[in-house]
Amino acid sequence: MTTRTSAPSRIPTPIVARVSLAAWRHNFATLKAAAPQSKFLAVIKADAYGHGAVQAARALKEADAFGVARLGEGVELRAAGVRQPIVLMEGTFSHEELALALHHELDLVVHDETQLSMLEERARTAAAGTDPPRVVWLKLDTGMSRLGFAPDRARNAAERLRVLPMVGELRVMTHFACADEPDSSMTREQLARFELAIKEINPPVIGRGTAVSSVVGLANSAAILQFPSTHRDWVRAGIALYGSSPILGRSAASLGLKPVMTLCSRVIALRELQPGRSVGYGASWRATRRSRIATVAAGYADGLSRHLPSGAPVLVAGRRVPLVGRVSMDMITVDVTDLDDVRVGSEVVLWGDGLPVDEVAAAAGTIAYELLCAVTRRVAFEYF
């Protein structure tokens, strides 16, 4: 077991994120089995969705590449000794960032004219041999309408990239807007647009240049599991690696995924309340019977959503009980009236093993991504 915490490791804390390396590897294997002919890009941006990017890279050594969003995330991984290819999925935003990305041997995504022009300017001004060839991903906008060249501009962008000396291999990608929806017509439309663009940018290469070949990447977590037609040379998985379902209406367990993070704390106080007594800020919940209320050391300063309502599920001593009252900065309260053996010190699971993070997120009116990424620095991390 290893630990990670912002406080000195000898100082105990009641709230702990237990991260299962075995579950990480299981989820990777499950997704890999769904697309066995494709290379695998493991998305570990946002500190691996709050789980620890360096630890994720070490656990997922069989991944063919890692994906991050920002330059600092890639530099952190390189500093930790990660040598697999790292794809900077938003690309770079300045000449300084571009120079650093190339220095740290990060693969680039190019999704707009500004980024393409920066590469062309660097090719004109950098000394010969300064930048060893890198993989560059050309991103197309097939319907997400956030990043990417329009399909009718794809050929021009590809031709301009092909002749740049720092472009060792050119690959093409897009991103699906509705792959989480079973039988999504939007996904089929995006795939059709992408196929037409690929035909345009894959003519025979004449003279000097870098071939695009057929190296493309399409499928995200949801598409890996339910749209096999999108499996190409590469797939890339994010949320499913962490044990959350990427498909609407399907549980993670039904997809063969296991929770990687179990967020745990402890009961720190017990109170007996008479009918009519309230709990917490705003007196938003009142007992309708004689009630036993447990106070738990966990709040929105640890990453819980303040939008969790009374009735949201919590596990105390392995059994489900309802949250009552508002989530505060450092504490929540739960109704343990129907449990006989809860004591100060009893373990509480806020999500994870036995309580899917997707269910807790739904209760808060959000998604698992937000809860996982919101876990804060004062939570201790233990890796098993």
Image (cartoon, rainbow, N blue to C red):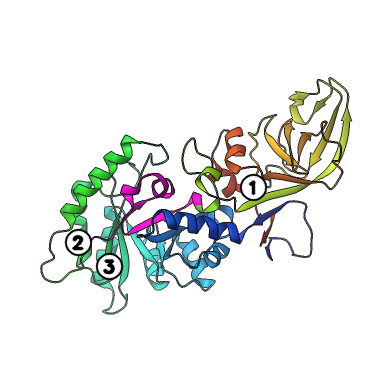
Asked if residue 127 shows in the view, the reply is yes
Reply yes or no: does residue 237 show up in magenta: yes
Reply yes or no: does residue 43 show up in magenta: no
Residue at the extreme left: 206
Q: Amino acid at mark 1?
A: Gly
Give percent across and percent down for residue 377. Answer: 66, 55
Q: Is residue 231 above or below residue 98?
A: above
Sequence-earlier tag: 3 or 1: 3
Front: mark 3 or 2 = 3
- Residue at 81 percent across and 20 percent down: it is 288
Q: Which residue corresponds to mark 1?
A: 352
Sequence-earlier tag: 1 or 2: 2
Q: Which residue corresponds to mark 3?
A: 169
- Residue at 41 percent across and 60 percent down: it is 40
- Residue at 63 percent across and 33 percent down: it is 307
Look at the numbered discs 3 and 2 and tell me whether their residues touch, using CB distance below 8 Å: no
Q: Which residue corresponds to mark 2?
A: 160
Q: Amino acid at mark 3?
A: Glu
Sequence-earlier tag: 3 or 2: 2
Q: Amino acid at mark 2?
A: Arg
